[in-house]
Image (cartoon, rainbow, N blue to C red):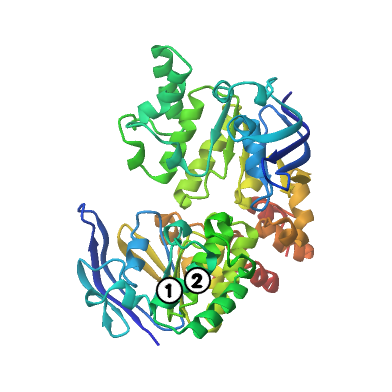
Amino acid sequence: MSVIKIENLTVQYNGEEDKALDGISLEINKGEFVAILGAHGAGKTTLCLSLNGIVPNMISADMYGKLEVLGEIPPKIPVRQLAAKVGSIFDNPEFQMSQLTVFEEVALGLQNLGVDKETIEKNITESLKLVGLEGFEERSPFEISGGQQQRLAMASALAMKPEILILDEPTSNLDPIGKEEVFSVTRKLNQEEGLTVIIAEHEVEVISEFADQVVFLEKGKIIEKGTPSEIFPTIVERQELVGVRVPQVTELAYNKKENFNSIPVTLDEAVREFKE
Amino acid sequence: MTTLKVENLKHIYPNGVVAVNGVNVEINQGEQISVVGQNGSGKTTLVKHWNGLLKPTDGKVYVGDLDTHDHSVNILARTVGYVFQNPNHQIFAASVKDELEFGLKNIGLDEDEINSRVNKIASDFGLTDFLDINPYRLGFSLRKSVGMASIIAMEPDVIILDEPTTGQDYLGIKAIRTSIKKLKEQGKTVIVVSHDMPLVAEDTNRVLVMCDTELIFDGTPSKLFSTDDILKRTNLLPPQVTSFMHKVGKSNSESSILSVSDAINKL
């Protein structure tokens, strides 16, 4: 069942010559884990911001084509209303924090929607548990680690019980522990809670393990889409052109085909497919 | 030629937090060093002592013959350049050209020398077309290049790069790694604070691992990636190809394969 349908979508920011998105078409099914890859300026953030309605409702732009998210047309409904169904996480968690305690931070979105007190408390407890932050309720959002802040941002989104989670480079400012925390929570939400996940990310080794579908953007156009196994081996020779690296084991196997039964995209696969 | 020396360094921040505790290390001219560890381990605090941005609470830090305790940043900066992780913390001039000139004027170079250095560094970093533009109109990668170029133009013996590849895409990372290689060829000491393990593995030859305020490892990347207890304690993950070669028994416990091209040669 598709939850996102995009047909021939074009987005152009006011006053800019180039289109940020240039006629893209994409369908995403419920429960899928989709990674958006591409160089800086390829259109990854614009795609994320179009799906939650921030473009064009808060950042003005011209938008053409068809865009449907959970049966809604994002430009036509208030961003706040869509946020209850589509949770968004950005690269700088600190910018998303505004409250004195973790509890209040998570409560904010729900209060804005006028949810009753009991439901708010129940949802907060559940969502903090999902991201592994139970017991942090009274802490200040500004005194916890970057990984914890990013998981807090995820809890705030989750408290609204969204069906889709959009993450725009959520780990680019985190250290290795923080990255691991965010990726493992994201994977749990996808696999155990059935959330549809759309993530723009540079960590291709991790993406290869998690993603059902990778979408490569270049200058606002989709140039490749498919499973990591379908796509990564085909771009080994075009990494520079595409502006995206392939997993190291993929590059190794591609250059040493005689040592591998097939071209792997993950470490485990590489070990399995290796032959002397 | 500048040797950096750290003797029993202890740093306590005004709020009482101990950030570095009892570190000893000596770095020779021309080494490529990476400093790794989790956020809060003390790595940035350690490196900020090398250009005098921070002064020891206890112990000594020497830049060549200079005791950093007795010299200010603007003297030490002629020898040790520090490139901030976030270029916005560093850039303040109204044009790229002004930004590149600023440090050069500070160290008292004449106009001809300034012009020639600005033109050369701009061309090295692909900034020639942007000299008259406000740095804040540039994208993040280019702004980061401006931050790096303005320090390198001063030609310090030692260059410290704080998280140079964070938030960069493939081409941005490639450009930064190329400039590190160039600095190496020029005999500069390069000190990189980074979580980027392929960079640590391929572009540096000595790794300092900080953990809970202490220096717990000082050795080659190859040794580090074969030392499981250090990796576990610090949550460091070797480059994927390094792990692969260990797993299939193509590298021994003493030395690791550090890059895809090394692995290709080895198989």
Task: Say if B153 sits above or below B99 in the image.
Answer: below
Residue A50: image quadrant is top right
- Tell me where residue A249 appears, x and y as whole percent: 67, 58
Task: Say if A21 sits above or below B189 in the image.
Answer: above
User: Where is mark 1, residue-wise?
Assistant: B103
- Tell me where residue A81 appears, x and y as whole percent: 56, 20
Quadrant (top left, top right, bottom left, bottom right) of the C terminus of chain B = bottom right
Q: Is residue A169 left or right of residue A224?
A: left
Looking at the rendered structure, whether the residues under marks 2 and 1 are on a common chain is answered as: yes
Quadrant (top left, top right, bottom left, bottom right) of the N terminus of chain B = bottom left
- Mark 1, chain letter? B
At horizontal 66% and vertical 40% (from top left) the residue drawn is A14
Q: Is residue A106 left or right of residue A42?
A: left
Secondary structure under the numbered disc 1 in the rendered image = helix
Distance between the Cα atoms at labels 2 and 1?
7 Å
Indicate which disc residue B100 carries.
2
Q: Amino acid at mark 1?
A: Gly
Mark 1 neighbour class, 10 Å CA radius: few under 14, some 14 to 19, many 20 or more? many
Q: Amino acid at mark 2?
A: Leu
Q: Nearer the viewer, residue B94 or A194?
A: B94
At horizontal 50% and vertical 77% (from top left) the residue drawn is B153
At horizontal 76% and vertical 32% (from top left) the residue drawn is A64
Indicate which disc residue B43 carries.
none
Q: Is residue A7 left or right of residue A90?
A: right
Task: Say if B67 sits above or below B98 in the image.
Answer: below
Mark 2 neighbour class, 10 Å CA radius: few under 14, some 14 to 19, many 20 or more? many
